[in-house]
Every structure is written in structure tokens, then in C-alpha cells.
Amino acid sequence: MTNFGQVTATASYVPEKIVTNDQLSEIMDTSDEWIYSRTGIKARHIATNENTSDLCINVAEQLLAKKNLSPEELDFILVATMSPDYNSPSVACMVQGAIGATKAFAFDISAACAGFVYALSMGEKLIRTGSQKGLIIGGEVLSKVLDWEDRTTAVLFGDGAGGVLLEATDQQHVLKESLQADGTRGMSLTSGYRGSKNPYGRSGVEQTSCLTMTGRDIFDFATRDVAKSIDELIKEDKETIDYFLLHQANSRILDKIARKVKVPREKFLQNMDKYGNTSGATIPILLDEAIAEGTLTLGSKQKLVLSGFGGGLTWGTMIIAL
């Protein structure tokens, strides 16, 4: 009998420190009105003494506690991140070691803001091929890769982590999916370039740690390619979708996608006003918050569209039943 993956618990965690738009205006040429009118963002959480692994470990511990699971029961841990502590070890392995999940294999997925959807798709395939339980976590400390003198990027991003416990069931919960990428446009969003550096030769640019983004390119990509992908995936299910949980990059992107796919805007949940863009963490944080508030209920069979999009360029959309 084929097993399927089902989300049976959610959790999220953000650093304690909140930085408002007004506070940002004290260190750069910007204002609350300028930021909010263009993005829908009012504040973000910023890590002061925590790294990506710390946030993800917190989420993992919450997930285990909610289901009263022993870490030895986990078969895998996948972490979606573009801001790992190290190139190696992976954040997933750091989580595995910290929580004592001795029987779980672990690895990171680097697909930027589409990372959580990519990881959830991968995790569900692992369940279908024999695994029973696994953690899917999206976690970022983007504050460490920002140029804090660049108001075009620094005002957009925040730090946080969210995740789900995926367990085997005999009923299908991931109903449809579409994962896509276009590397020819990858330079529209970059972070952490490292050039060749060794005794036998050097590249022109050795290292650029800060995130760079061509905002107009990303906006156009999201409102064209991503909107088209969502529209094609939901065309036979549009009337039965309860809510849309899209990557929380910009409220104007959500406005435009809602119009293009001809779905009421109120079906698009959002929380970027409080958290900003946390890249691979936006969707699981939004999912956990919606469940905590009672908008969504695990086991209800509510039908959701999850869609992440960003650097790579990568984008992925899924229809799932809770």
C-alpha cells in the first residue's frame, strides 16, 4: 500500500527583537510611509545573538513536543534556507544533532523563497517511498547577508523559521504540484558570491557576501510567471480552494496575482506587515499562525494553495488538503 505525506503539526519561531519602519528611518533614508505603501511591511524580527540553526532547532523542538514524539522516531529532516550557518555542516544536520534525531538523515535545500515548497514536495516523496515521519523546516537569518545601507533591500527582509511535521497516512494530502526554475534569470537575485581563490589562479571578484536584487525583475517574474503557474494548476479546482498561502514578499504582488487568477483577495492570507520577507520561512510561519488563530485547522481537509517564488529563479506551487 502506498503511503502519503500529511502535515500533522506546525510550529514557528522569530527572534525577540522587532525593528519597525520608523526605527529603520533612523539609520537610512527611508520612512514608514515609503516602505509600507510599496510593500505592505510595517516591521520585521531581527536576530541579535541567534543564527539560522538556532531558529530551526527551536521549531524542531516545538514540533516534537506538540506530538509528544521522541526524536529517534524521525526518518528525515529537511531545511530550506539561503542563509545557513556554514556551507558545511548543513543546518539540517545541526538540527539533527541538537535534538538527538539519531536515525534521521538530514540535508538542506537551497531554493531561496521557493525552498519550503520544494522541501515539502521532497519530503512527501520520501514518505511515499517508505519513510514514516520527517520534519520540513524553512529558516532564515537574512539580516546577516543584507547591506544595511541599501534601502532597496534592507527594508524588505526579516529573520524567522517555521516548519511542519510530515507523517505517513493512507490518504493523499498533496493533491497537485508544479515545481519550476529558470537559471537564465538567476542574477536578478544573488547572495554570497565566492570567486575562485587558490594558489594557482584568482577570479576578478573573490567574494560578495551581501544580497543583491533587481526589484523590478522579481516583481515582474512573480506577477507574470508565478501567476501563470498558479492559474494553470488551480484551473480545475479554483472554486474548491479555501485559502492561498503565498510567499510573503510584497502585498502588491499578492494583489496583482489575485486579480490575474480571478480569486477574491480575501482568500490570500498575509502577515508580511509583522515579519517582512523571511524567504524560505514565510509560508510555514503563515501556516502556523493561521492555524493558531483558528483560520485553518489540521485534519479539516481544507484545501490550500501554497506557492513560493524567488532566487534561482525558482518557483513552486502545491495544492494540499490539511
Image: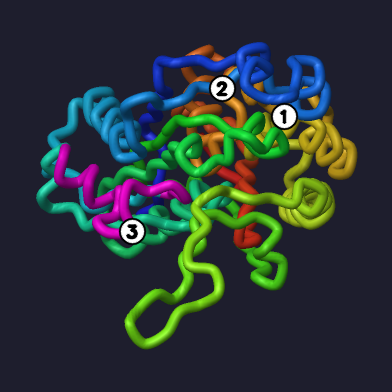
Amino acid carrying mark 3 in the image: Asn
* x 55%, y 17%: residue: 19
Residue 228 showing in the rendered view: no
Amino acid carrying mark 1 in the image: Phe
User: What residue is shown with label 1?
Assistant: 268
Amino acid carrying mark 2 in the image: Arg
Q: Quadrant of residue 190?
A: bottom right
Dot 1 falls on a residue whose secondary structure is: loop
Q: Earlier in the sequence, mark 3 or mark 1?
A: 3
Q: Earlier in the sequence, mark 2 or mark 1?
A: 2
Based on the picture, tell me whether residue 233 belongs to the magenta stretch. Answer: no
Quadrant position of the N terminus in the picture: bottom left
Looking at the rendered image, the disc whose residue lies closer to the viewer, 3 or 1, is: 3
* x 62%, y 21%: residue: 27
Looking at the rendered image, the disc whose residue lies closer to the viewer, 2 or 1, is: 2
Q: Quadrant of residue 16?
A: top left
Q: Position of residue 67 (x, y in %)?
A: 25, 27
Image-based side of 223 in relation to 75, left or right: right
Gap between marks 3 and 1, in whole Å?
35 Å
* Magenta residues, start to end: 80-98
User: What residue is shown with label 3?
Assistant: 87
In terms of depth relative to the viewer, which is nearer, 250 or 187? 187
